[in-house]
Amino acid sequence: MLKIGGQRIPTKTLVLLASESLLIILGLALATALRFMSSRWDYAGENTVARFLVVVLMCEFALYYNDLYDIEVMKSRARLLIGLLQALGVACIGLALLYYLAPGVSLGRGIAALAVPTIMTLIFGWRMLLDSKGFFFLRSPERVLIVGTGPTGISLTREICSRPDLNLKVLGFLDEKGENIGKSLVNPGIIGGLGDLEMLVKQQNIDRVVLSLAEQRGRMPYRELLRLKFAGVTVEDAHTVFERISGRIALEKLSPSWLIFSDGFRKNRFLMLAKRSLDIAAALFAITLTLPVMGLVALAILLESGRPVLFRQKRMGLHGEHFEIFKFRSMRQDAEKGGPSWASDGDNRITRVGSFIRKYRLDELPQFFNILNGTMSLVGPRPEQPYFCEMLEQNIDFFSQRHTVRPGLTGWAQIKYQYGSTVEDAKRKLELDLFYIKHLSMSLDVAIIFETVKVIFLGKGAK
């Protein structure tokens, strides 16, 4: 199963990506044949395959950045149609700009005019077919049995129920004491006790047994699990499955031993050198590219609320060391006269200019200088104020482990979760940060950067 970092990419997404690439090529071939009234498809000129691939890449990027590989979007036909129109419109604009700069890769206006409605029809029709018939060419859902009624198993079941793309079906829970049979925990509920394990696995044709015991001491059915394992049934821990499908490490009932003995958390010299090299190159490029934008933002802040334009604040960085973060000021000068506090919805401390630059993350552009001086990285956990870090370390287990890597301008938690303003939000973001640290890699960093661009364009999650 293909993964980014340690998170599994749903089969449905991979099938859509591959099939729609082929449909785009088919649409281009049909448009070429209609344009020249011939079954030959090389009338577009030399290097036709390369020219087609340019169109495929542009279209796929546009589909991705319009959230058209999001399962929630695909559930609504209206949103799907509007999204496809927007995506293909963006692709056309991008290709027009590319063809202006490099006329040699153009397919020609005649082919383009025919290709757009053809591709639109093919992709929309294909998605409607999949929606109505289901993925008839994929295997039936994998049948899962949750052994125990621990909180991680319940969270895992909720995640599976909300994600039909995972192709998993939870048949029910086994209660540790054999009590409460028939009680609904999520949906499904408790269908038996630990003594019914082997019988239910055989009776319900279970493919995967997931362990989530509320109390393991003296309750683990080792002999039964061993027999099932040797019979070919997959047996896994709930934390492991939850991590793989959600991109988070659940903190409920998480033992230090699970973190110690699980794979990951590797930081070899080559990886850290490559990551630092990317940081420096990206920071230099971004500073050069955004200097005019930074000048305009500074002028807008100055005109609205005067000096200072920059906001400097102590944050906690690598190994718990303090550093000074740079941001464009988005709040009133006296915003923290009563002490540190998280931003919230409708925060009256935020200025009009501040509201705009926060939405599109323009307030964070000066942090490229933090990346350049080595106090921050391009990708990593979001740096918090020391006051909040000390408070959260007392309330959330393993919180200090997020300081084992440099804090980042963007990160896994930033793209997967909205701005946090409570202890519960901080806990959820820590689950994402721990996943990132465990699966630290250049491929995961690149994926986060791509997703960050989409978040910025859509203005998601800012406060």
Image (cartoon, grey):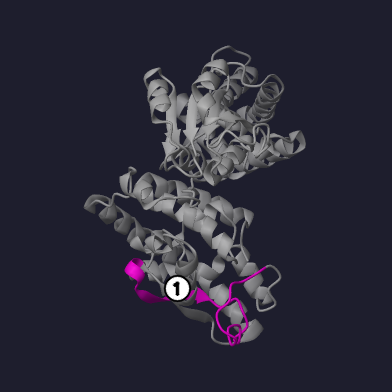
Q: Can residue 432 be found in the magenta stretch?
A: no
Q: Is residue 227 above or below residue 112?
A: above
Q: Which residues are magenta?
A: 318-344
Location of the C terminus by quadrant is bottom right
Location of the N terminus by quadrant is top left
Relative side of 295 to 300, left or right: left
Residue 220 percent coordinates (x, y): 43, 35
| Residue highlighted by disc 1 | 390
Q: Regarding mark 1 in the picture, which secondary structure is present there?
A: helix
Dominant secondary structure, magenta: loop
Residue 259 percent coordinates (x, y): 36, 49
Give the residue at x 55% y 21%.
200
Farthest residue toward the left? 269
- Is residue 439 shown to the viewer in this render? no
Q: Nearer the viewer, residue 278 or 412?
A: 412
Relative side of 386 to 345, left or right: left
Q: Can residue 336 be found in the magenta stretch?
A: yes
Residue 327 percent coordinates (x, y): 50, 74
Q: Nearer the viewer, residue 380 or 214?
A: 214
Q: The residue under label 1 is which amino acid type?
A: Glu
Relative side of 262 to 240, left or right: left
Q: Nearer the viewer, residue 86 or 72?
A: 72
Would you call the spot at circle 1 few (<14 residues within 10 Å), some (14-19), or many (20 or more)? some
State the image quarter where residue 33 is shown: top right
Q: Nearer the viewer, residue 408 or 438?
A: 438
Residue 244 percent coordinates (x, y): 46, 39
Q: Is residue 306 above or below residue 298?
A: below
Farthest residue toward the top? 39
Give the residue at x 65% y 18%.
34
Q: Is residue 305 above or below residue 444?
A: below
